[in-house]
Every structure is written in C-alpha cells, then in structure tokens.
Image (tube, rainbow, N blue to C red):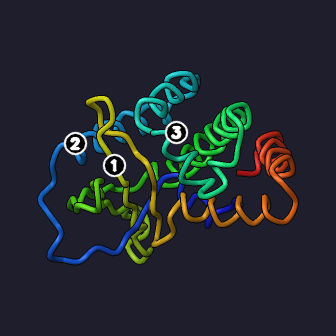
C-alpha cells in the first residue's frame, strides 16, 4: 500500500481515446472546487476536522470499498463489510492527504472530461512551480453522480488505479491468509501511519 497502492489516493492518470474526450463540465467543477478548498485548508495547521469532512463529501467510500475488495466483497458478512469499509476509509483519507501535500505547491491544470461507462473521468495534471524540468503528475478522478452529488469512486495517478492496486493486494492476502489477516494488516498500517 505504498505509492502504487494509492497512487493515488488521489491522483489518477488514465488512458481514454481522444475521440471520447469532452469539454470540462460539472464533474470537473466539483473536483476543482474541492481540491482548491483542500489545498487552502492543508496550508494552515489545525484544520484536520475540516479536511476530513471535505474528504467525506468528495469520496464515495462505499464504491471504493466494494471495488477494492472485488469478488471477495459478496463473501463477507455485514459486520466484516462494515469493519473493512471503516478501515479503508482511514487508509484512503491518509493516502489522499499525503498525495495532496506532495502537490500543494504545484499548478493544477484541469484538462478535460471523458465518459467511461457510467462514470466521468476528470483528467488533471500537476506541474511543479519550482522545477520546470520535473515531469508533470497525471491525475485522473473517476466520478459518478450519487444522490445528486458528484463523488470520486477511483483515483488514477500516473496510470495506476487506486482501486485496482488495492484490489490486487487485498484479494491476494485474503486468498493466501484469510480475511482476518487482511483486517489485521490494515489496522497495522493505520497504526504505523504506513499508508
């Protein structure tokens, strides 16, 4: 669950055909507004509660949990799903915040929107203000409308999907050592701040 795993937690880069690219729209507006507000909050100490609340408004934890556990989700009890979802929420929040802090002094360019199934992918690019030779970070947010609001259901950073990365790790652990071991490993990572 290092850079590959969250490559996100926030940033996604994705491959979509040029033909499917569209002009920016409401999903981009939401990402831009929330990201701008988050950067402002993270620049000042003492805003942890506000940052967490904004993450909760932006991220679809339910969709992230189901997709991250993949085929293993259906096999879990309601109690197991609830525990897993609560732990994943903490991991995603911490990873997202860490990745935001890495690009806090970058210029964020909001490129275009592309339809991907029932979702909209908002493509962004983070460009360093200090090092012109530094490679831009490609970040894409997979957005879906839920209860009238746009929410993030995946983040792809430099071609690495947060959901796919988590799913690969999680299902491997469950198949090899069982679901309780996955829960323990998640708790250990959160306790150590190793996200």
Q: Which residue is labeled 1 in the image? A: 143
Q: Quadrant of the N terminus?
A: bottom right
Residue 181 place in picture, x, y as percent: 86, 51
* Nearest the eye: 187 or 136: 187
* Nearest the eye: 26 or 170: 170
Q: Which residue is labeled 3 in the image? A: 61
Mark 3 or mark 1: name the one nearer the start of the chain.
3
Give the residue drawn at x 71%, y 58%: 170
Q: CA distance from mark 3 to mark 1?
A: 12 Å
- Count neighbours of disc 2 (C-alpha within 10 A) and say few if under 14, some if 14 to 19, many if 20 or more: some
Mark 2 or mark 1: name the one nearer the start of the chain.
2
Of all residues shown, which one is farthest toward the left?
23
Can you tell which quarter of the image residue 124 is in? bottom left
Tell me if 49 is positioned left or right of 145 in this view.
right
Give the residue drawn at x 12%, y 58%: 23
Q: Which residue is labeled 2 in the image? A: 29
Closer to us: mark 3 or mark 2? Answer: 3
* Nearest the eye: 136 or 92: 92
Residues marked 3 and 2 touching at CB (< 8 Å): no
Give the residue drawn at x 30%, y 53%: 119
Residue 120 place in picture, x, y as percent: 27, 54
Give the residue drawn at x 34%, y 75%: 15
């Amino acid at each position: 669950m290092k850079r590959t795993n969250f490559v996100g937690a926030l940033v996604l880069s994705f491959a979509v055909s040029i033909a499917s690219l569209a002009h920016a729209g409401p999903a981009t507006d939401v990402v831009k507004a929330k990201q701008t507000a988050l950067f402002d909050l993270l620049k000042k100490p003492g805003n942890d509660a506000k940052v967490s609340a904004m993450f909760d408004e932006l991220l679809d934890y339910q969709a992230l949990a189901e997709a991250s556990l993949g085929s293993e989700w259906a096999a879990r009890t309601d109690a197991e799903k609830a525990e897993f979802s609560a732990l994943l929420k903490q991991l995603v929040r911490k990873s997202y915040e860490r990745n935001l802090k890495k690009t806090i002094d970058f210029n964020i360019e909001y490129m275009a929107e592309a339809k991907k199934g029932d979702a909209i992918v908002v493509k962004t690019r983070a460009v360093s203000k200090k090092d012109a030779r530094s490679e831009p970070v490609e970040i894409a947010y997979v957005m879906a409308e839920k209860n009238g609001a746009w929410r993030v259901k995946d983040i792809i950073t430099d071609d690495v999907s947060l959901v796919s990365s988590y799913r690969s790790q999680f299902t491997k652990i469950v198949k090899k050592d069982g679901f309780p071991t996955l829960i323990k490993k998640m708790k250990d990572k959160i306790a150590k701040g190793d996200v």
